[in-house]
Amino acid sequence: MHENKILEIAVKASDDKKAENIVVLDMKGISLISDYFLICHGNSEKQVQSIATEIKKTAQENNIELKRLEGYDQARWVLIDLDDVVVHVFHKDERLYYNLEKLWGDAPTLDVEGVLE
């Protein structure tokens, strides 16, 4: 499956569970890890887990290989590796602390609204 379709599925699954401040960083040529980072947050551990569960479920329904899921039990920073797309679901407090958008500030952002239409 093309990485743009994987990204679209992950963004929509995040949005369906009311993830906040969804940001997509285009990591092509910047990171060897993946082509895109999807970053979002929830306001509670339960919401973080709900967002992560929805992304995992939707990926599996679309035959997208889930390479790794980490941090689910603590629900402070859940990392979901969908190969070309790595999803970071933060608890709102952790997102402010780690500030991945600043860390990867040289990565261009994509218009999430265009993906959700």
Image: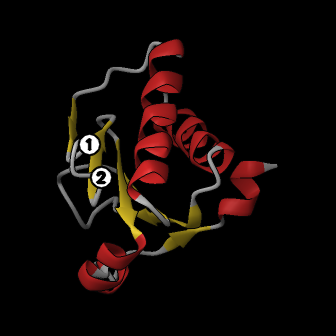
| Residue 32 seen from this side | yes
Residue ID for mark 1: 72
Is residue 104 toward the left or the right of residue 113 in the image? Answer: left
The quarter of the displayed image where residue 89 is located: bottom left
Please provide percent x and percent y for residue 47. 49, 51
Q: Position of residue 36 (x, y in %)?
A: 39, 54
Image: 105 above or below 54:
below
Q: At numbered mark 1, what does the secondary structure look like: helix, strand or loop?
A: loop
> Is the residue 28 above or below the residue 64 in the image?
below
Q: Going by the picture, which residue comes out furthest to the right?
A: 117
The picture places residue 32, in percent across and down from the top left corner, at 17, 54
Label annotation for residue 105? none
**Residue at (62%, 46%) from the top-left corner?**
17
Q: Are marks 2 and 1 in contact (CB under 8 Å)?
A: yes
Q: Gap between marks 2 and 1, in whole Å?
A: 5 Å
Q: Is residue 72 above or below residue 96?
A: above
Under circle 2, the secondary element is loop
Residue that badge 2 annotates: 75
Whether residue 1 is visible to the viewer of this picture, yes or no, is no
**Residue in the image at 33% along x and 34% along y:** 82
Judge from the rendering whether residue 77 lies leftward or rightward of residue 4; answer left or right: left
Tell which of 108 and 88 is nearer to you.
88
* Horizontal side of residue 78 vs 20, given as left or right: left
Front-most of 100 and 35?
100
Identity, as a three-letter code, of the amino acid under mark 1 = Tyr
Residue 98 position within the rendered picture, expressed as x and y whole percent measured from the top left: 24, 79
